[in-house]
Amino acid sequence: MANYAIIGIAIFLGTLFVGGAIITSKLLAFKTPHSRRKVEAYECSEEPIGDARIQFKVGYYIFALLFLIFDIESLFLFPCVTIFKKVTAGSITETSPAVLFVELGIFLFILLSGLVYAWKKGVLIWE
């Protein structure tokens, strides 16, 4: 029961701290009247030219998402290879190297099939 009291006190103090910070910032914040200048984008003291909403080609976003996906997948590959090396060296005996090799093969197959799919769709062509 004492553990729950500690958790309750921590939640209360956290709420008090965050609520106090928000209320203090609202009370001490500098207030200016609403004007057109207030809602403009700040561009290093330069007058903004044009609209801030520029349409980009969707291919850029898809290219960026593919980069993130393959970047994260390659990061997952390093721990898998480290575990595979430990299993083949005999440090870890819970799993067999054959099962781990098949799992790594499936992982790489999914990764490469995604790359081939993106390549055939023409996503990797930068225009």
Image (cartoon, helix red, strand yellow):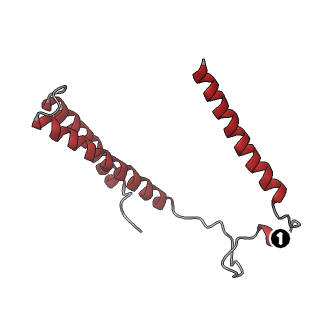
Does 125 sit above or below residue 5? below
Give the number of callouts: 1
Q: Name the quadrant containing residue 49.
A: bottom right
Residue lying at 50% horizontally and 59% vertically, measured from the top left: 58
* Left or right of 110, for residue 19: right
Q: Residues within 10 Å of mark 1 (few under 14, many from 20)?
A: few
The single residue placed furthest to the top in the displayed view is 1
- Name the residue nearer the viewer: 30 or 101: 30
Give the percent coordinates (x, y) of residue 7. Answer: 61, 28
The single residue placed furthest to the right in the displayed view is 33
Give the percent coordinates (x, y) of residue 98. Answer: 13, 31
Residue lying at 40% horizontally and 53% vertically, measured from the top left: 68
Give the percent coordinates (x, y) of residue 120. Answer: 32, 53
- Name the residue nearer the viewer: 5 or 118: 5
Q: Name the quadrant containing residue 101.
A: top left
- Name the residue nearer the viewer: 1 or 32: 1
Which quadrant would the C terminus be assigned to in this image?
bottom left
The single residue placed furthest to the left in the displayed view is 89
* Left or right of 13, for residue 84: left
* Left or right of 113, for residue 31: right
* Left or right of 106, for residue 52: right
Does 31 sit above or below residue 107? below
- Name the residue nearer the viewer: 31 or 7: 7
Residue lying at 36% horizontally and 63% vertically, measured from the top left: 125
Which quadrant would the N terminus be assigned to in this image?
top right
Could you say whether the residue bearing mark 1 is in a helix, strand or loop? loop
Q: Which residue is labeled 1 in the image?
A: 36
Mark 1 residue type: Arg
The single residue placed furthest to the front in the displayed view is 2
Residue lying at 31% horizontally and 44% vertically, measured from the top left: 76
Give the percent coordinates (x, y) of residue 11. Answer: 66, 33
